[in-house]
Each structure stands twice: as C-alpha cells, then as structure tokens.
Image (tube, grey):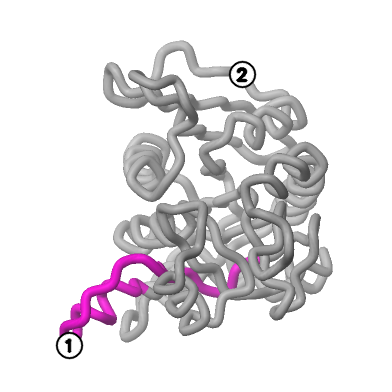
Amino acid sequence: MVSHGDKSEDAVVSQHQDRPISTVVIITAAMQTEALPLVNKFQLTEDLESVFPKGVPWVRYHGVYKDLNINLVWPGKDLTLGVDNVGTLSASLVTYASIQALKPDLIINAGTAGGFKAKGAGIGDVFLASECAFHDRRIPIPVFDTYGVGLRQAFPAPNLVKELNLKVGKLSTGDSLDMPPQDEASIIANDAAVKDMEGAAVAYVADLLKVPAIFVKAVTDIVDGEKPTAEEFLQNLSAVTAALDQAVTQVIDFINGKCLSDL
C-alpha cells in the first residue's frame, strides 16, 4: 500500500520479502451476510475475549487455515439501531484497531460493490482493485482537493491476478449507496470500475500504518444499468456473496506459504 510520492511500498517489500506471510486480517464489508460464509469456510471461531476496546460492536473470528493465522473482522451492528455498521467511519476504525491488536502481514478487504458496465463489470464479477480513492470528499481548494480524493495504490499482486484470472480495476469509495450527479462526476474522474462504501478508508489506514493491503470486490449491481441500485443489490446479494467466498478462498490458498514479493 502506498500513496503517491511515498516509498513505503518498497520499504514493506524489502522488509518482508523473504518471510512467508503468516498473519492475515480479512476486513469484511459491513454486511454480516458477507462475513459468515467465510467464517464457515475457514472454520473460524468467534473471539469471546475481544482484542478490541470494551463496548465496541466489532466482531473478530479467528483460526488457523493451512499455514496461515486467519483473522476475519466484521464491524458488527449499530448499538442503537441494530443495522450493520456500513460506511467509511467504521471501516477505518476497525482497520486501525485490527492492525494495532493483531499485527498482520497482509490485509484483505473483501466485500461486495457496485460495478460499471462501461468498465466491463457484470453481476458476479470479482475485481482486484488496483487503487482506491474517495468520490464524496469534495474540497475545492488547491492541494486539499487532492487530499480529499485520497488516492492510494493497492499492494501490487500481479501473480495473484494472473493465477486466479481476476479482473483488475480502480475502486471508488463513498458513504452513500446512491449516486447523485456530483458523486458520478467524481467517480468518472477516478476512472472507477467498481464503487463501495469502505475500501478507500481501509486503504488510508493501511497506508498510514504501512501494512500491505489488497481489495477483493464482487459486483452485486450495475451502477450505470437500468435497475435501481438498492433493488438489484438485494436481489443479487446471496449469489454474489457465494462468488466472493470462492474468490477469497482462492486468494487465501494462493498466498499460503508465499512471501509478499511472490504476490
């Protein structure tokens, strides 16, 4: 993970390139529906003595899969309203706390996303994000405008992309499910193939704390299609979650026994 003008990626690779990846943190999107299949797949156990601060709703599942210590962290449900903790605020907090507590070698942000048919996205497609940026932090002041976009490169994984035949595209993140004209203009400027509600926040924290991060996104709805986003999202969530589950399993199997430089 590296921002423009930063050499942190080189530092991370040189520091860890000869050491097999041992500890992985999977930061799931906020929907519990997207987290539980992976919990079952890797036979993870819920942490009953939380490593997180007392009172927060975040949930950690953990276990050993092959040679990897797997931690899956789900932001949980809002303590007042009982809905899933969606959005960038929970994502950034959970990522920060997970890095501090678990010291991962690699972060995988796994979740669903809207896709753009203009960029070749179809329902059920799985993308590995090449970079992440925000589309709803508009600060029209020199330099602050670039800060608002918050562009971060994902950790490069060309061998992973080739082996699993994943699509690659840019990810744009915002805190709203809909896409008003201002957001649309920013997403187009970001050249995004997929949009979500947490990726760029995870990328920001991973870059800040110098932890490599990759982003696996499965398309539930076509943003520039004919159907209403919310309707299409709910209609396809179950099937696309299965595709995401399969892709993340393949990613984990691929990185097992490998170093960061092998990705």
Q: Nearer the viewer, mark 2 or mark 1?
A: 1
**Pointers 2 and 1 in contact (CB under 8 A)?**
no
Find disc 2 in the rendering and name its residue. 45
Residue closest to the eye, 245 or 5: 245
Q: Residue at x 55, y 43 (%)?
A: 29
Answer with the quarter of the image where residue 77 lies: top left
Query: Is residue 192 shown left or right of residue 80?
Result: right
Answer with the quarter of the image where residue 62 lies: top right
* Tag count: 2
Give the number of the disc on residue 142.
1
Image coordinates of residue 54 in percent, x first then y, are 27, 18
Residue 146 colored magenta? yes
Image coordinates of residue 239 in percent, x first then y, are 82, 42
Q: What stretch is highlighted in magenta?
A: 128-150
Image coordinates of residue 176 in percent, x first then y, are 44, 53
Q: Residue at x 28, y 24 (%)?
A: 53
Give the number of the disc on residue 240.
none
Tag 2, which secondary structure? strand
User: Please, is residue 94 above or below residue 32 in the view?
Assistant: below
Residue 197 colored magenta? no
Q: Which residue is drawn at 22% across and 75% down?
A: 139
Residue closest to the eye, 195 or 246: 195
Q: Which residue is drawn at 39% across and 23% down?
A: 57
Query: Is residue 139 shown left or right of residue 239?
Result: left
Residue 23 seen:
no
In three-dimensional space, the C-alpha distance between marks 2 and 1, rounded to whole angstroms, equals 48 Å
Q: Type of residue at label 1? A: Pro
